[in-house]
Amino acid sequence: MQKTVAVLGGGIGGLSACFHLSKSPQVSKIVLLEGDGRFGGWLSSTRREDGAVFEHGPRGIRPAGAVGRNTLNMVEELGLESEVLPVTYDHVASKNRYLYVGGQLHKMPSGLGGVVRTVPPFSRPLIQSVLKEILISRGKEEDESIHSFVSRRLGTELADIAIDSLCRGVFAGDCRKLSVRSCLPPLYNAEKARGSIVLGMLLGSGPGPDVPPSTLAKRAAQENWAQWSLKRGLQNLPEALEERMRNGGCVEVHRDTPVTGLSTNGTGWEIQLEDGTIKADHIISALPAKALASALPSAAQPLSQQLLEIATVTVAVVNLEYEGSVLPVTGFGHLVPSSEDRGLLGVVYDSVPFPQHNRTGGPTTRLTVMMGGAWFQEVFGNPDEVTEQLLLDRATQAVTSHLGVTTPPIWSIVALLKDCIPQYYLGHWKRLENMRQYIRDHNLPLSLAGSSYDGVSVNDVIFSGRTAAEGLVGKV
């Protein structure tokens, strides 16, 4: 049957859903509704006249695993292969990652030497934790916080320093609240399947989704890419998708078109907009969970309630540019555990992995300081009242104290990303199960995609759009 499908939300998840739907002959019409003036959501880059590129959101995408291959396959289909900037595993940005602990930078242990020797800030060799881990019995709980899981299996020191920092870098979140089952499924599954993270990593813990590699994905594997970006910044990916939708025929693209309400009419949906309504047989929502909750009809109150329980955090992203080469170390960047400085999550040394994004002309150093997250309110107060100047001052102070840079930046830009990263707290898996069960039980023609549900990485969100589309029209 020929269907009209409405995709709500034109971030990378909604764009991905449209991309996959548009390949299917079963859909006669696809309507993409975006409330904002631009597409791409949190994928946002500033391109300056002199060639410099600054990322306000994600800045490097990992090619690993099925979801990583899926994204590279899409990049190739969009004809962007020649735009890709790869960073390999033997690059200094992949080998050198730092922790700022006790007022100084420490290189994260890497290679065999780093594992068998005692490397500060750790008080014993990692090999001890790793060997013990193999012998620790399985957890009994259906879910567990990341901190509890890692403490139990690898010891509190690793949990307090390394894992605490990692969760701040990836989720801008608190590892004492975040769910291991939903945030780090490979660790959870390794324990379930093999009784040990180490054995799970060595032996594998069950097959992931089957995604055959494109030429580009094969190249990434052969050349051992650790991450990649695009010459014009990651915003180029949503731009290429939008371009494809506008020229691909069956997608009707609307921006500046917020959805004000939804009502069901027995077989499909009526979508209320500020200036009229649209009818659709099915909705793929790639909106943040809270936005979907407020649009759903009151009859779906139990679903709205569950959606509202998915928390999000606000992150301040400050891009800084310095004259000359100012870094005392070289590498990807450094993370800061919550015990060291609650408000400052980490600093990325953007010029190291992606020197192509520096301006033309004399040497410069681009850095990005990430702040807030789960600690935003506590450290900076209400995000609606905090000034850009305060955030800029806080960021430049961090660069001075952590990296010894005494000159002021020659250029800066502050972005306040409100509610940008969903937090999968304990029991998130059960909430998802309940929501999807509710949708089935009430025959709601609704699919959930985007970062609120099955993963917050760019790869996960792109894959969620694909999964939602294929759930409707089968594999394309």
Image (cartoon, rainbow, N blue to C red):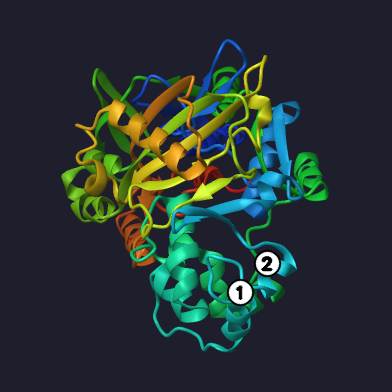
The front one of 138 and 453 is 138
The residue sitting at 67% across, 14% down in the picture is: 361
- Asked if residue 25 lies left or right of residue 293, the reply is right
The residue sitting at 41% across, 48% down in the picture is: 345
- Asked if residue 366 lies left or right of residue 318, the reply is right
Mark pair 2, 1: CA separation:
8 Å
For label 1, the residue is 126
Residue type at the position of mark 1: Leu
Q: Is residue 197 above or below residue 452?
A: below
- Asked if residue 275 lies left or right of residue 173, the reply is left
Disc 2 and disc 1 in contact, CB within 8 angstroms? yes
Answer with mark 2 or mark 1, whichever residue precedes in sequence: 2
- For the image, the number of numbered tags is 2
Regarding residue 390, the answer to whether it shows in the image is yes
Q: Residue furthest top?
A: 49
Image quadrant in which you'd find residue 394: top left
Regarding residue 40, the answer to whether it shows in the image is no
Q: Residue furthest left?
A: 298
In the picture, the quarter occupied by the C terminus is top right
Mark 2 residue crowding within 10 angstroms, few (<14) / some (14–19) / many (20+): some
Q: Is residue 431 above or below residue 463?
A: below
Query: Element at badge 2?
Result: helix
Rendered location of residue 425, percent (x, y): 34, 62
Q: Is residue 255 above or below residue 390?
A: above
The residue sitting at 21% across, 54% down in the picture is: 305
The front one of 356 and 274 is 356
Rendered location of residue 168, percent (x, y): 43, 53
For label 2, the residue is 114
Residue type at the position of mark 2: Gly
Rendered location of residue 67, percent (x, y): 61, 50
Image quadrant in which you'd find residue 53: top right
Query: Element at badge 1?
Result: helix
